[in-house]
Amino acid sequence: MGNWQIKGTYVEACNCEAACPCIFFSPPTEGECKVIVGWRIESGDYRGVDVAGLNTAMLAYAPGNMKDGNWKVAIYLDQRASDAQAQGLQSIFSGAAGGHLASLGPLIGEVMGARAADIRFAGDGKRFSLSVDGAASVELEAIAGQGGGAVNITGHPLAIAPGQPATVARGTHLSIDDHGVHCEIDNRSGLFAPFQYQG
């Protein structure tokens, strides 16, 4: 067993049409992908520091096919976190602590910044909302599949939650405005799933 583990729920939304072609290593719908990802940590600790109940988010911009890298990213840490909690969250979500998110490292060309923010993550089941003060907000609703059930994608190459089926959603509204990345659109791609990371 490693020295940290967390689990909870994650959401993501971007400017691509649903479902985002980037997750299959296809070009973005509009030639570039602007995405916000949010995580609600429901249980976990980092080197003995309890991080349950905290939220984290990441803004990413890819100028072309995501598999080609050159991503620009920014990390947002829950402003409610203590110094020790914030250090743990930054280590985990930057990939510095290892684990699944470390695998994104080779794709990142520039880290635009990391800062504390008021991150609000709400919802359960079919609808979620995420807001990052001064950066982004999104509302998601699951797409109804056959018989009204969920539409799931499993095992895609850019899975944020490996081993978990991601539910396909529609971002009923997505707003991003930070680090020169701007987006204000409705009815585009979204995904959500439970996640579990460890290192």
Image (spheres, rainbow, N blue to C red):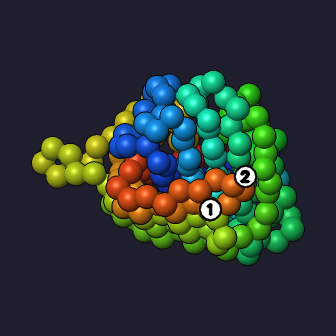
Against 168, is 129 above or below? below
Disc 2 versus disc 1: nearer the observer: 1
Circle 2 — which element? strand
* Residue nearest the viewer, comparing 195 with 182: 182
Of the image marks 2 and 1, the number of the one nearer the N terminus: 2
Circle 1 — which element? strand
Q: Which mark is residue 74?
A: 2
Q: Position of residue 56 (x, y in %)?
A: 66, 60
Mark 1 lies on residue: 177
Mark 2 and mark 1: Cα distance apart in space: 12 Å
Q: Quadrant of the C terminus?
A: top right
* Residue nearest the viewer, comparing 129 with 183: 183
Q: Position of residue 179 (x, y in %)?
A: 72, 56
Q: Position of residue 128 (x, y in %)?
A: 42, 64
Q: Quadrant of the N terminus?
A: top right
Residue type beneath disc 2? Ala
Q: Residue at x 56, y 47 (%)?
A: 34
Residue type beneath disc 1? Asp
Q: Is residue 163 left or right of residue 116?
A: left
Q: Position of residue 106 (x, y in %)?
A: 74, 28
**Is residue 43 in sight in this rendering?**
no
